[in-house]
Image: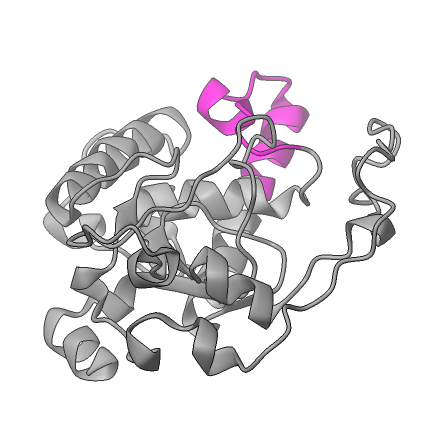
Amino acid sequence: MHSSAAITQQWDSRLLGISLDLPSTHLDATKPFTPPAKKSSSSSDALDSATSFLWQAPNSNAVLYTGQKWVELHAFVSHLLELQLSAEKQQTSVPSLFTNKLVSKRYPSWLEHALKLSRARGYWTLYPSQLTAGNLAVLHNELYRAPEEYEKEIKRDSAGETTEGLLAAGPLLKSLPSGGTLPPFDEMPLLLWDGKATKLRDLDAHAVDYTWEFRKAVGGCEALTPSELLPKKSARDLFCAKED
């Protein structure tokens, strides 16, 4: 059912990855995140209203990225680094859209680029419900180490990080809503990167606007032919660079 819906509607082509972790905060690590309930649920029972959901915000904890999207992300980051190196050599300023930081430094720097790619392409990450997440993976915050690129800037906050987490007791199937039946993509709540509930057409509209802004501000694009506008795995369409 999950696969047939994905194939028919091609929602699977937007899947960046599958996370076993349910973040407790937004990407900026300052605002608490509350997972959504089922679209049609009026039940007060936590298990009945719990559901997996799609969130445009990527993750770096306990997540599996699909092979094609990981390749595309690598290409995207390579272009960004080339752009940054070129700006440094020419002693020119880097566009604010490139330098604006929306992801906390508690996460590795590549997650910021994954967010940019997700916003430009309209990609999302599949997250488990709150009840299921505790049966899938536990983050050991007591073992947290700042990303290498930020460890000089981050002072470790030991508050709340001394208790080792444990997986929830009991069979995994008992924590799954609907008896373990996976809902189709179009029945799961869909969230923009900032956590706001949205619909597919609105997410597409946001992606179009962000892509246009990115191409103009970062990619140096002015006028593109219809073929150049088509998304490419190499991410060349976002940077207006000629293929080698």
Q: Is residue 180 above or below residue 101?
A: below
Residue 187 position in % (x across, y down): 18, 62
Say left or right for 185 vs 86.
left
Closer to us: 105 or 80:
105
Residue 233 position in % (x across, y down): 37, 63
- The reply to whether the magenta stretch includes residue 119 is no
Q: Quadrant of residue 134?
A: bottom right
Q: How is the image coloured?
A: one colour
Closer to us: 5 or 101:
5
| Number of marks | 0
- The reply to whether the magenta stretch includes residue 82 is yes
- The reply to whether residue 164 is in sight is yes
Q: Quadrant of the N terminus?
A: bottom left
Say left or right for 50 vs 8.
right
* Residue ID at (42%, 71%): 68
* Residue ID at (33%, 60%): 51
Closer to us: 212 or 191:
191
Residue 211 position in % (x across, y down): 28, 37
Q: Quadrant of the C terminus?
A: bottom left
Residue 170 position in % (x across, y down): 59, 78
Q: Quadrant of residue 72?
A: bottom left
Q: Is residue 8 above or below residue 103?
A: below
- The reply to whether residue 242 is in sight is no
* Residue ID at (56%, 51%): 78
Q: Quadrant of residue 17?
A: bottom left
Magenta segment: 81-104
